[in-house]
Amino acid sequence: MVISQPMSAAAYHRPRSLREALSCMDQTPNARLIAGGTDLLVKQRKERPGVAAPLISLRSVSELRQIDIDGERLRIGSAVPLTDVAASPGLAERFPVLVDSIRVLGSRQIRNVATLGGNLCNASPAADTAPALLTLDATVELVGTDGTRELPLAEFLHGPGQTALMPGEILTAVILDPPPPGAGMAFLRKGRVKMDLAIVSLAVVLSMDGDVCVQARLAAGAVAPVPLRLDAAESILVGSQLDAATIQRAQAAAQAAIAPISDLRSSADYRRRLLGVYVKRGVSAAVHAAGGRS
Ligand SMILES: Cc1cc2nc3c(=O)[nH]c(=O)nc-3n(C[C@H](O)[C@H](O)[C@H](O)COP(=O)(O)OP(=O)(O)OC[C@H]3O[C@@H](n4cnc5c(N)ncnc54)[C@H](O)[C@@H]3O)c2cc1C
């Protein structure tokens, strides 16, 4: 019989502003940040059952709950629930790859509380929004008591559960530049069952000039310690007519660039094969979305 242990009461702080949140972190160095809690609370129960660390909630920090246009750039507050990100006016038209990656994440209940910041800071190799954001060349904004810095997302993700966040820093926003004009986008993802993490995911953003591919960005999830851009496959596609031989070379380059593991969800071999299939399907879907032949 499994008896679930009740958690002991923990200090819970609910700052209302970024300044308050930073000062709270300064005064409570052993506290953990909590946004939606859909990763953190599961992890806490697994790692230290019955022991609850002090928590600093980001849910009422007004600066983190906004989506703004800053000049040409879109700034998505890190604590905006994923449902609200996906429903943000114009986002599905401009960044369909991001919205598609959110729509398959977890369940409606999860998406109603889970946040974009939490998905990135949890740093799972299978985080669904990460490949989409990598193909959009997203930047993350990090704020600590020493100031603000911006990093390309690729430099933020260091490994499973590891990021570039320094002690006392908060990921405040994800910043997107306008998408390449006329780009077609696609997001493909396979899980074992509904609500499970991805076995493989692939995001594609691609622009065509007639029959020739002029820009290609591909990023894969769950096939390496971090979600990653498939640079070699991109180079093969750019400047080409995307015939069968070119696609085959891009598939092989993508498969050579990854380091999948075998785990309870899939064998490494299956992940590698599936990524090859997804490169072909994803490129075709993105060309179609860009208004070309696929
Ligand atoms: C049933 C279930 C299904 C799921 N399915 C999926 C799925 O299909 N795909 C997927 O990608 N994920 C899935 N997840 C994982 C999870 O829902 C997502 O990763 C979610 O986006 C996490 O966001 P959150 O706001 O809940 O993060 P939290 O759990 O609040 O935080 C996660 C981590 O990030 C840190 N953190 C959060 N926000 C910040 C910030 N702004 N600055 C610094 N650190 C921060 C926290 O301290 C913690 O370490 C699932 C989870 C569950 C429980």
Image (cartoon, rainbow, N blue to C red):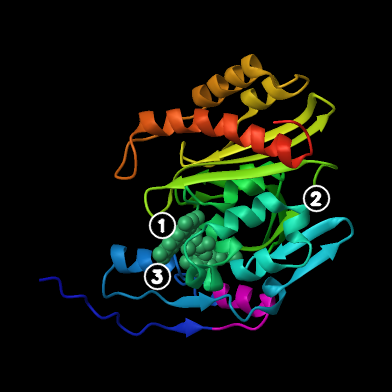
Is the residue under label 2 in contact with that under label 1 (CB below 8 Å)? no
Q: Nearer the viewer, residue 245 or 147?
A: 245
Q: Which residue is mark 1?
A: 194
In this rendering, is residue 166 above or below 81?
above
Q: Quadrant of residue 195?
A: bottom left
| Main SS of residues in magenta | helix
User: Which stretch is magenta?
Assistant: 14-26
Q: Earlier in the sequence, mark 1 or mark 2?
A: 2
Nearer the observer: mark 1 or 2; the answer is: 1
Nearer the observer: mark 1 or 3; the answer is: 1
In this rendering, is residue 106 above or below 274?
below
Q: Percent from the top left, x then y, of residue 75?
A: 76, 62
Is the residue under label 3 in contact with that under label 1 (CB below 8 Å)? no
Please state which amino acid type lies under the numbered disc 3. Answer: Leu
Please state which amino acid type lies under the numbered disc 2. Answer: Asp
Please state which amino acid type lies under the numbered disc 1. Answer: Lys
The Cα–Cα distance between marks 2 and 3, rounded to whole angstroms, is 33 Å
Q: Percent from the top left, x then y, of residue 67?
A: 75, 68
Q: Which residue is mark 3?
A: 41
Q: Residues within 10 Å of mark 3 (few under 14, many from 20)?
A: few
Residue 125 appears anywhere in the view: no
Q: Percent from the top left, x then y, of residue 140?
A: 68, 54
Whether label 3 lies within 8 Å of ligand 1 gets the answer: yes
Q: Residue at x 38, y 74 (%)?
A: 53
Tell whether 181 sits left or right of 216. Answer: right
Q: Nearer the viewer, residue 244 or 102?
A: 244
